Amino acid sequence: MTTRSSTDAARVIPEATVARLPVYLRALTALADSGIRTCSSEDLATAAGVNSAKLRKDLSYLGSYGTRGVGYDVDYLRYQIAREIGVTQDWPVVIVGIGNLGHALANYSGFRSRGFRIVALLDADPDLVGRSVAGVVVRPFDDLEEIVREHDVAIGVIATPALAAQDVADRMVAIGITSILNFAPAVVAVPDGVDVRKVDLSIELQILAYHEQRKANGAVEPAAGAGEGGAA
Amino acid sequence: MTTRSSTDAARVIPEATVARLPVYLRALTALADSGIRTCSSEDLATAAGVNSAKLRKDLSYLGSYGTRGVGYDVDYLRYQIAREIGVTQDWPVVIVGIGNLGHALANYSGFRSRGFRIVALLDADPDLVGRSVAGVVVRPFDDLEEIVREHDVAIGVIATPALAAQDVADRMVAIGITSILNFAPAVVAVPDGVDVRKVDLSIELQILAYHEQRKANGAVEPAAGAGEGGAA
DNA sequence: TCCATTTTGTTCCCACGTTCACAAACTCCT
DNA sequence: AGGAGTTTGTGAACGTGGGAACAAAATGGA
C-alpha cells in the first residue's frame, strides 16, 4: 500500500470522473439498502448505467479499494467515495430566489440526506420575506453577508429570474462564496477560483428537440444520441 | 455556396456543439432585445460565456451565416439556430409527477416561450388528480397513452420519486415517446433510439462540494474547475 | 502445493473536443 | 481603383476521455 496523505499531488481526478462519482455513490447506497455486501465492477456499472471498464478506471483514480477475484465491499467503497467527494462533512448552503423553483429546491429531501444543509432562504421580494418555506423563514436578500459569515457558507444556489442572476452572483462572490449552482437561465461570469455549475431546464429540452427533429427527418442516429442506452 | 438540403448527410453536428446552440440562441435573443442588429463572434462569445474560436467553429457546422469583416446579423443567425434546433416548431410535452419539482416545471415560463407546450400533467396520486396546476388540470397517470396519441407527444418529462422513474420511463417508451428528460434521482435504462437526458440537483451540488473540499485542502485549482471563468 | 477461475487495475489506442493560427473575404477610406 | 483594417471560416496541433484487452492478484478445489 502506498502512502497517501490527504493532500496527495498524484490525486488529480478527471472532471468526467468527478461527475460520475455521485452516481456511483447513489448506486452503492441502493445496493446496500438491498442488503448486498459485495459487488463486482460489472454489478455496480450496471446499477450506475455505465460501462464496467470505465467504472474500474474511475475508481482507480481514488485508489485500490477492490479485491481482485472478489469485487468491492459495498460499505467500504461507499465510504471512500463519500469521503472523496466531501459528502461526509456538512455543507451549509444558501438559496437565493424563492419562486417556484426555489420552493422546490427548499423542499428537496435529497440535499439534506447528502450532507447539504440549507441554512437560509433569501429573496428580494418583501412579500415573500417572513413566510415559512420548508420550515425555514425567508429572509431579505441583504442578510446574505451576515448569514454567510455566521455559518461559514461556501456554496450558494441562484434560483432567481435571469436578470437578477449576475447581480446575485457578484454579491455572493464579494462576500466570499466560492461555489455557485445557477438555475437562472442566464450566463453568469465569475472570477477565477470560483466554480459555477449551471442547470438549465429549457436547454435540456431544446437538446432533446434537436435529436427528435433529426429522428423525424429520417436521419439514422449513430448511437444513443444523448443518454445512456441499455436494455429496457 | 454549396447546395444544402434539409436532410444533408454532411450535417453531423457534434454533441458538444448541440448542447451550446441553445445558449447562443439565448444570447442572441438578449442582444436583439437590446436593439443590437449585428454582432461579431467576439461579442456573441462573450455574451454566451465561451471562447470566440469555439463559437465560430460551432456556427460553422450549421453553415456560413456570417460575413467576413462584418460579423453576424443577429436576427438572421437567431432564426438559423432556432430552425436547426427545432424550436421554430411546436413541441407537445407531458410532465409526469406533480410534486414540488413538477409544480415548478409546470409554472416555468421558459418552456412555453421556446416552443414547448405542456399538454398534460400526470400523477398517480388520486389526491392530486383533478387539481389545477399552472392552469392545467392534473390527470391520472393511466391517461398517458390517450394523451400521447391525441397530441402526438414525443417528449416526456419525469419528475417522480426515484422508485417510480423506471416504471414511468418504460410506459413512456412503450407508448412511443422517444425523448425523456429525467429529473428523478435514478438511472433509467431505455432501448436504443430513445434519448434520455438527466438533470440531477444533488449531483450538481456534490460536484461543487468536491471542488470546494479541494480548495479548502490548499490544492491549487488548475483553472476554473467546473464553470465558465471570466471577469466579474 | 499447484492449477483453474474470477475479477481488478492498468496500458494502449482511438475518437472527440478545444484552441491556435492563418488564409480568405468583406468594408471603408483615400 | 487600391490598400489598410477587420472578421469569418477552417486546417492543424494538442489534450482529454472512452473502450478493448491483458497482466496481476486473489480465491477455491484437487
Image (cartoon, coloured by chain):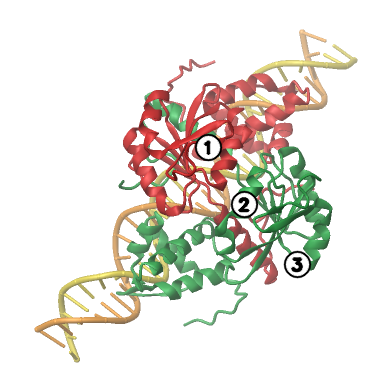
Chain colours: A green, B red, C yellow, D orange
- Nearer to us of marks 3 and 1 is 1
- Nearer to us of marks 1 and 2 is 1
Q: Residue at x 63, y 59 (%)?
A: B208
Q: Check disc 1 and report the residue beneath it.
A: B131
Q: Amino acid at mark 2?
A: Leu
**Closest to the observer, B224 or B104:** B104
The chain holding disc 2 is A
Question: How far, Cα to Cα, is label 2 from label 3?
Answer: 21 Å
Q: Amino acid at mark 1?
A: Arg
The chain holding disc 1 is B
Q: Does A98 appear above or below A2?
A: above
Give the quadrant of residue B116. Answer: top right
Q: Does A93 appear above or below A36?
A: above
The percent coordinates of residue A195 (x first, y second) are 68, 55
The percent coordinates of residue B30 (x first, y second) are 72, 29
**Tag 1–tag 2 contact (CB < 8 Å):** no
Q: Check disc 3 and report the residue beneath it.
A: A152
Quadrant containing the N terminus of chain B is top right
Callouts 3 and 1 on one subunit:
no
Apparent side of residue A122 relative to residue B177 in the rendered image (left or right): right
Q: Residue at x 45, y 53 (%)?
A: B162
**Closest to the observer, A177 or B120:** B120
The percent coordinates of residue A214 (x first, y second) are 43, 27
Q: Check disc 2 and report the residue beneath it.
A: A105
